[in-house]
Image: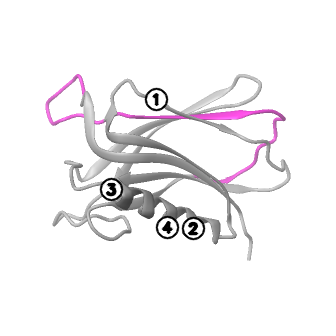
Amino acid sequence: MSKLFAFSFFLILIFSCDSKTLISMNKELSGVWGKQEIIMFNLPELDSLKGYDLFINLRNTNDYKFNNLYLIVAMSFPYGKIVTDTLEYKMAKPDGTWLGNGIGDVKENKLWYKENVTFSEKGIYKVSISHAMRNNGDVTGVKNLDGIIDVGFSIEEKTFK
């Protein structure tokens, strides 16, 4: 467990040095992401005149059995509007090599969610993330997704060159 703590501290240190990352929130999982488990994040109020890039951050281990990941991400606006996206991300190369960054069997993945978003409504925006993984030919989906140890959400201020 001390290795996990040291690794988490190292990641926090790296992200705190990144001047573009304004907000980074994470939920630690036990290594299993349940089908019914929805990860929720409340976003603080942001400058409505600026643009932001939004990311989903995932950490996985070698226990993750798939080369891709399907997520359902919903953003709830302060006045009731909800935008829901079903997203697919590649997690590994065809030869099985993980695409994420990291040393050892834990890989960090910074996945694009939305680009140049403005938060024009005053109030709290909410983001919910759930997985939508299925085995081939299985209609019900994967009940417990092994190998996901962290799900996070980050926001970066859009920089124009």
Viewer-proximal residue among 2 and 87 = 2
Q: Residue at x 81, y 56 (%)?
A: 50
Residue type, mark 2 in image: Leu
Residue 153 higher or lower than 2, as above or below = above
Classed neighbour count for the residue bearing mark 1: other residues with Cα under 10 Å, few (<14), some (14–19), many (≥20): some
Q: CA distance from mark 4 to mark 2?
A: 5 Å
- Residue picked out by circle 3: 90
Identify the disc placed on residue 38.
1
Q: Position of residue 67 (x, y in %)?
A: 24, 53
Identify the disc placed on residue 13.
2
Q: Are marks 3 and 2 in contact (CB under 8 Å)?
A: no
Q: CA distance from mark 1 to mark 4?
A: 26 Å
Q: Which residues are magenta?
A: 114-141
Q: What secondary structure characterizes most of the magenta part?
A: loop
Q: CA distance from mark 3 to mark 2?
A: 27 Å
Q: Residue at x 24, y 65 (%)?
A: 93
Q: Nearer the viewer, mark 2 or mark 1?
A: 2
Identify the disc placed on residue 48.
none
- Residue picked out by circle 4: 10
| Number of marks | 4
